[in-house]
Image (cartoon, rainbow, N blue to C red):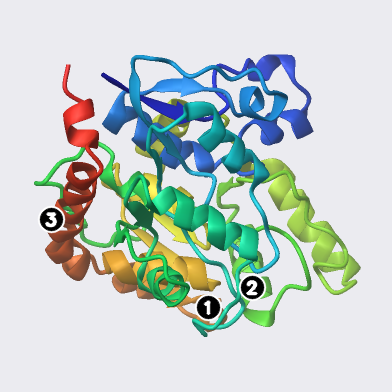
Amino acid sequence: MAIGLFWNDNVHFDLHEWPMKFFWVGNNTGNLVFIRALKNIFRPRVFPLWDIDSGTFRDDPEVSHYITTELIWLTENTTYPHVWKMLSGIGDKPLVPISVGVHSRTDSTMIALHPDTVRLLRTISERAVLGVRGEYSAAVLERLGILNLKIIGCPSLYYGMDDAFRLTKPEFREDMRLAVNFRTFYGSLRPAECQFLTWAANRRLPFVEQTQQELTLLNCQNNGPQHEYLSAWLKEQKKVFFEVEPWVSWLRGNVDFSLGSRFHGNILAIMNGIPALTMVIDGRMQELTRLFRLPVMDAADFSMDKPLQHYYDLADFTEFNRVYPQRLAAFRNFLDKNGLTEAMKP
């Protein structure tokens, strides 16, 4: 038996212009982090998403289960015709969705997903246990009558499947090497966000970018000098990785602490033993960080008047280390219930 994963793989990034490089990674290089984890966990056969869209996909008779991450961002008016095509293409085999997540601007579980999406999720749940991102997403789906699910969080935290994994945080040093990250540059920056970026620019800190969205004058509320200052820093210090291994190598060789509002950028640091503090900006991040008891701060609470040690001290991994074995056990149980553990055997 084998497991199939739907993902656009084996792309030669050196052959593509900047926008197409981001296109192939789902417009966010953070996607590479959880895809890397899935490959490490399942050793799957990878089937390109474009084969689904083009109608050229053919079911592999040796594959007993297929997995997909195409349902991680459910919103009220979104439909997923390509996931219907997956179901049609694989016949009666299970399609196991990983990290199904509901995205809403509120905390209300009364969000109304598109009827076609509800029907899709119910159809999938007749063949497989849905792997759900967190408690909020689970509550929304259960209210809609989708009950065959299990909360698993994000697979990026299960890379290596190591029950003994713990993050041991070194004592603070003034010369600690810090790297920062930030949400996508859209809309006007809030005052605390301006402070964070200015603080990072003043220190000439390396900036790990995950999207192609450039900082605009509008982001800076038409403050020309601020836009010029931050843009010059980003041009000098921005780092973008289209493969995970070079990203990991850079982190291990250059970073002692990661700070910012990118979930997967910080998780990649954490899973390589580097402390990180995540600045929560939306319900998705809140749901995931709460599940894993990751150290967080509200992005609105950042102040450039506070010393670096203040933020390093907030990165307390006591609770994360305590619950991590429980989360991994729940993930293993999810694999068992879907028959994936058996399918992973040689």
The answer to whether 246 is drawn above or below residue 172 in the figure is above
Q: Position of residue 180 (x, y in %)?
A: 52, 55
Q: Secondary structure at mark 2?
A: helix
Pick the front one: 46 or 159: 46
Q: Give the quadrant of the C terminus.
A: top left
Q: Position of residue 235 (x, y in %)?
A: 73, 43
Q: Give the quadrant of the N terminus.
A: top left
Q: Which residue is labeled 1 in the image?
A: 302
Label 2 packing within 10 angstroms: few (<14), some (14-19), many (20+): some
- In which quadrant of the rendered view does residue 100 lie? bottom left
Q: Which mark is residue 193?
A: 2
Q: Which residue is labeled 3 in the image?
A: 325
Q: Position of residue 134 (x, y in %)?
A: 37, 66
Label 1 packing within 10 angstroms: few (<14), some (14-19), many (20+): some
The answer to whether 83 is drawn above or below residue 290 in the figure is above
Circle nearer the N terminus (2, 3)? 2
Look at label 1 and name its amino acid. Answer: Phe
**At x 78% / y 24%, what residue is drawn?**
17
Look at label 3 and name its amino acid. Answer: Pro
**At x 68% / y 72%, what residue is drawn?**
194
Dot 2 and dot 3 residues touching (CB under 8 Å): no
Q: Position of residue 58 (x, y in %)?
A: 54, 17
Dot 1 and dot 3 residues touching (CB under 8 Å): no
